[in-house]
Amino acid sequence: MTSAPEALLALSNVNTFYGQAQVHFDLSITVARGHIVCLLGGNASGKSTTMKIILGLVKPRSGEVTFDSASLIGLSTPQIVRRGIASVPEARRLFADMSVRENILMGAFVRNDRDAVAQDLDRMLTLFPKLGQRLAQRAGSLSGGEQQMVAMARALMSRPRMIVMDEPTMGLSPLYVDRVLELIRTINQDGVSVFMVEQNASLALEIAHEAYVLQTGKIVLSGPARALKDDPRIRDAYLGGSEAA
Amino acid sequence: MSSWFDYTINGLIIGNVYALVAVGLALIFGVSRLINFAQGSIYLVGAYIGWVAVMQLHTPLPLTIIVVAAAAALVGLVIERFGLRPLQNSVRIAPLLATIGISFVLDQLVMLTFSPNPRALPSQLPDVRFQLGGGTIGPLDLLIAGVGITSALLLFVFLRYSKLGWAVRAASQDRDAAMQMGVDVNRVNQAVFGIAAALGGVSGMLVGMYYNQIDTAMSLQATLKGVVAEVVGGAGNVPGAVIGSLLLGLVESYGVAVFGTSYRNLFAFLLLVVVLVLRPNGLFASTRQAPPEPLTGTFIAPSRPLRIPRWALAVAAAIFAVLPLFPVSFYVLQTLINAWLLGMLALSLTLVAGTMGQVSLGHAALLAIGAYTSALLSLTLNVPVGLAIVGGGLMSAALGTLLISPSFRLRGHYVSIATLAIGEIVSLVILNWESVTRGPIGISGIPPLTLFGYDLISPSSVYWFSLAVMVVLALLQGRLLTSHLGRSFRAIRDDDIAARAYGLSLNRYKSLAFIFGGFAAGVSGGIAAHLYSYINHETFNTQQSILALTVVILGGLGNVVGAIVGSVALVGLPEVFRIAAEYRILIYGIVLLLLVRFRPQGLLGTI
């Protein structure tokens, strides 16, 4: 591993259980400030649970989670969000019966600076120009790709220091997949760190700085994304044959 | 004579009152997917706080409304904080049972404080009526309409323009996602319970003023009507709840116009059953809505049941069997006879609710069907009592299953609502079908128990008879549970979709469970009828349904031995401690609350 600049988020020796079943075995992941870090893994590898640990939706049995050097253990999800972590949940999870505008503004729920929030809404419309015409529409009536845009805009509205994304390209058309990856890069260039969980390894490694590979709750591989992309083990597991998208 | 115009106004006014209750239910359901069965109790509390304010403190009307809203909101906050928040991470049946327990505790506290006698609650408004179109309208009608419309407007502004209102809406659409936006769900719950309680309390006060009478029976009725209106409008849908309430008010009012007052509730519950069967998501449900209660598997607490060795059970049965040979008092035997009768009902409910996962809140209706059938068979057709009781059991099995069958496709809370409504319908049909059931007069002179020509008059013979019947039913049910059939029942309870995928027909198995359970409950009702010699439509009421549910939870859902142990405990312990009758229901409510909080799997564990 290269010596990363400074850790923004760090999971160290996390062990998680669902009842009797252990999901994570001494999981350690670091997200450096300003980086895009990607967590790869197949089904039931514990990827989504990792997201839930970071967001405080699931409590680990042991281990430490720190954000900006302060522990997140014991904090509630809203408290963690207030520390500066925003989430783009799996399958987007918009508030289907609220309008697109209301959905985006819900992202600013933790903020109290009304004027700045209004400005940020305008900024989102330049970043996601398509949403401009959809503002009054019910969020549930949008296409999957458009919903993903709303989910990302919603996450950015809290002015987070880090965004965690659960399978941001899942179920999207190839056109939108490229668009989403492009946007993640743009967001990152604006100074927001990104931690994303992905099944689509080849795409994720395109934009990530570092990556981890999770297999049945254990990190089996990690390092700079560029190195991993050429790693034969990754190629065999994820990029081989027709699997590459 | 009142005109159609008057019936319409009356329907809309009553609808307005229901709306105040139903909107609260819808808000709570939206945020926590919970049907708050304590809503009617808050309405009751509101009515009595109104009485205290008007009669004792002599507050002017606007102040009375504010006092009632504030006090009721406080009750709502207490319920949320101490009754429901501790259950946040427990199984989904827990908060449902907790609200039932809370409702019993609140009702009993009001009854003990103010006595069950009705009281007058004057409205402090001038008693004039204005001519309007073809009818009249009074200041109280206008007040109720005004409160209804004002509340709706305030609620709209709150939900649409306040930050907390946004949080409420977001949390009701996706709780987890709302948390990830930084919404504190506890605060949302608090807000929602406070608002729901304030509206419910004011509603109770207005109804009290409308009829110039308040009494403790208002509570259950209000819960039922509110739930009907809310489900008709679509659970969790706030504007739907308002429209459902107005519709319910009109249906009732026109029903009363055509058929008479005693049919009012019948129309309400028929409307509910029709909606549940045809459109279980409500009249205004959007298509995107997921089917109600998709995760039945988490509804009931899994646990490892306590295994009691057979010899211990045999010894216990033998001890109880020889008990009358010893000089025990009539009082002890009488208490145990009650326990055995309740035990049969609990066996029935533990099968349906525990093994099958259909939490029935109307189980007393099965008792009533069995009791009336057996009483009428022996009285009018001179059928021997022993045979009549079997007839009662069969009728309960058949009719009970038939009545419940439309709601076989419902799950979770919806089953509870449907069974509650069906229970009420049975009681209302008994009340109104005078040519057969003798209506409100009831049936008297029911012949005492006989078996093969021998009269069972002495307490010990009745004791042996009821114990024997219960033991036989328990053995049969125990056998059933270990059979293939029992496994199928549990498979459907734990995951009905998976069970269906394996080829199990839900309708067939649910029918079988209700047939078996209906028989046991019907036999219990039949024996009771001959034991009491007099029954009427109120002999077997919702309180008994709730008592049976408490017994079943106490013993452990699905647990046959648990059902009997629970019955003996809940019938026996109040006797042992000589607890006065009026405190018993309070105790049952508290027992239910403590169980849900600290031992949801019951004493002997879920099977």
Image: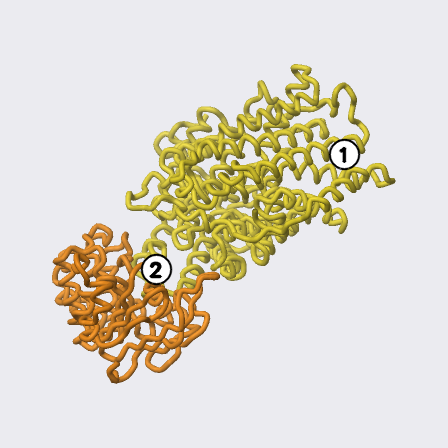
- Left or right of B462? Residue B605 is left
Q: Secondary structure at mark 2?
A: loop
Q: Position of residue A142 (x, y in %)?
A: 19, 52
Mark 2 or 1: in front is 2
Residue A104 horizontal/vertical position (percent):
23, 62
Three-letter residue code for mark 2: Ala
Q: Badge 2 is on which residue?
A: A44
Q: Identify the residue shown where x is 60% and y is 45%.
A: B559
**A24 left or right of B453 in image:** left
As drawn, B239 above or below A194: above
| Residue B374 - label | none
Cα gap from disc 2 to disc 1, whole angstroms: 58 Å
Residue type of the residue flagged with mark 1: Tyr
For the point 29% across and 56% down, the residue is A95
* Residue B593, image x, y percentages: 58, 54
Q: Which residue is mark 1?
A: B463
How far from the left and from the top, in percent, is residue B452?
Answer: 75, 20
Which quarter of the figure has residue B371?
top right
The answer for which chain carries disc 2 is: A
Whether callout 2 and callout 1 share a subunit is answered no
Residue B114 seen in render: no
Q: Marks 2 and 1: CB-CB under 8 Å? A: no
Q: Nearer the viewer, residue B437 or B546?
A: B546
Report crowding for label 1: few under 14, some 14 to 19, many 20 or more residues within 10 A (C-alpha).
many
Determine if residue B186 is in view: yes
Q: In the picture, one chain is orange; tell me its letter.
A: A
What is chain B's hue in the picture? yellow
